[in-house]
Amino acid sequence: EWDLVEEMYSCLSKYLDIYLLTYYDSVSDYQRYIKLPVKALGFDLVSNRENLENIRRFGFPKDKVLIAGVINGRQVWRACLDEKLRLVEELSKYAKDVIIANSCPLFHLPVSVEPENELEDGLKERLAFAKEKLFELKIIKSAIEGDQQARLEVERVKKLLSIKFGEVPEVREKVQNLREEDFVREVPYQERIKLQQDILRLPLLPTTTIGSFPQTEEIRMARTEYRNSKLSPEEYERFIKEQIEKVIRIQEDIGLDVLVHGEFERTDMVEFFAEKLGGIATTKHGWVLSYGSRVYRPPIIYGDVYRPEPMTLKEITYAQSLTQKPVKGMLTGPVTILNWSYYREDIPKEEIAYQIALALLEEVKDLENAGIKIIQIDEPAFREGAPLKKRDWTHYFNWAVKAFRLCSKAKPQTQIHTHMCYSEFNEVIEYIYQMDFDVISIEASRSKGEILSAFENFKGWDRQIGIGVYDIHSPAIPDKNSIRQILERAMKVLPVELLWVNPDCGLKTRRWEEVVPALKNMVECAEELRKELVSV
Ligand code: GLN
Ligand code: ZN
C-alpha cells in the first residue's frame, strides 16, 4: 500500500502543492510518510503520543511544513493552552514552518457552546465546540507571537483546568474495588437456560420485538409540551402510561411471546439514559451528524457516572403489570452509551465504561427485584468503538466485553438479551461470545440471512439468536414468504432451539399501519413453522 501511496503522490505533486493531512490516529510508517513528495505533512497530535515520539526520534525534513493537529477535533473539552503552547514551541525546533491546526475535521462537534445555558454549573467554561476550537488556535498563535492578552488567557485556562470537576469518590472506589468475579455470572449458560425456560416456558421460535414502537407525531408533541411546561409531569406520565397500555394490548392481539413497553418516554436510546445519570450532561442545541442526513445530540460525560435513582423501573413494571406475558426490561449498554457520547480524557476509557456499567447493574437489580424476568441491554455501538488499528483491538474488546458482563451480572434465572443491529460479526465473533448473554438479536433481513455465517462458522456457538426478519428501515411490509426464507436459512445452520424471531431493530421510525401487519406476518410465520416442526 505504501508503494502505491508514494507513486500517487509523486504523480500528483508534479502539478500541485500538496498539504497532506492525516488524522484519527498516528501515522503507521513515519519514515516513509515524511519522505512523501509533498509540501506539508499533517499530524494528529492528540489521539496518542506516537506521532510526537517519532518526530522527536527521527526529526522532520527541513524542506517541509509541519501541520500540527494540536486541538482535538473530536472531543468537546477546552484545551490546556499552556501545554499546547509548549508543544508547538517544541515542534518549531524540528520544523522550519509549523502550521497550528485542529487534529481532525470539526464535524464531530456542535457549532458553538454559546447557546447552551442549561448546563451543569461550571461545565460550560470547560467546553469548546467547533467555534471555540478555532478560537483556541488563534490564541495559541497570538501567545506565541507574544501577545499579552493571549498569554493571560493561557494562564487563566491553566488555572481553571487545574480545579477538579465532577468527581465522586464513592464511584471511583467502587471501580477500584472490582474483582474478577464481578464480571462473571454465577451459573454457566447451559444451566442458566434451564432455569430460565422453567420460568418463561417459551415456545420454539419465540417472537419478540427490539423495543421501540412508532414515535408518532402525537407522542413527540406531548413530549414538547411537557418540556415547555404545557403538560404537567402528572399529565405527561398519564399520557405515557396510556401509550404503554395501548402497545401491550396490540402486542397481545398480534400474539407476540415476549413483550416490550414501547420506549415512548425515550427520545434517543443514549440521550434518555444520559439525562438520568449523574456525571453526564446533555445539550439543547448540540446537533451533529450521525449518518447520512441523520443528526443527534451526543451527551457529554464530564464526571464520575452514577445513578441517582431508578431510570426505567416505573415504565417497565407498569407494562408488566398489564400482562401475563413476560415484558423485557430495556436498557442501553455501557459501551454504546460511552461510544455515542463525548467523554472525559482524564481517566482511561474503560474506567468510564465500568462506572456506567455499575450504574446499569443497579437498574438490572431493581428490575429483577420487581419481578422482571428478561432484561435486554442494547449494544449497537459495541463494534463501532473498535480502534482503527487492529493492534489496539484486544485492549478495546477486553474492556468492552467486561463492561457488558459487569452490568449484566444478573441472577441465573434472569434472561439477558442484547441487541446489535447490523454489524460485521465475522471479525469479532469471539468477543461477542465472551459477552456471555443468553440471547442476542441481530439484523438478518437485508443480508438475507448471510450475516449468520459468522455464527455458523463459530465452533460451539450455543447462545440463542434473534433473527431480524423485518427490515425496519423500509416502509415495505414483509410477507410471510420472505420471512420464512430467512428463518429457513437460519434453521439450516443453527439448531432451531436457539432461534428467536424478531424485526431487525426498533420500530420507532415506522408507522403503525406498517408495523401491525408486518408483525402479524412474522408471528403467523413462526406459528406455522412451529406446527410443521412438531409434526415431523
Ligand atoms: N431498543 C432500541 C429500540 O428498539 C434499540 C435501537 C437500536 O438498536 N439502535 O429502538
Ligand atoms: Zn438496532
Image (tube, rainbow, N blue to C red):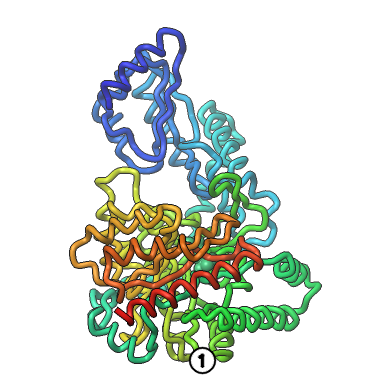
Side of 515 relative to 376 (left or right)? right
The residue that label 1 is drawn on is 324
Residue 337 visible in this rendered orientation of the protein: no
Q: Residues within 10 Å of mark 1 (few under 14, many from 20)?
A: few
| Picture residue at 71% right of the left edge, 79% below the top | 239
- Place residue 402 in its image quadrant: bottom left
Q: Secondary structure at mark 1?
A: loop
Residue ranking furthest to the left: 459
- Residue 476 lies, in percent from the top left, at 58, 57
| Picture residue at 40% right of the left edge, 12% below the top | 13
| Picture residue at 22% right of the left edge, 60% below the top | 458
Residue 476 visible in this rendered orientation of the protein: yes
Q: Nearer the viewer, residue 99 or 75?
A: 75
- Residue 316 lies, in percent from the top left, at 54, 82
Residue ranking furthest to the top: 14
Cβ(mark 1) to ligand 1 < 8 Å? Answer: no
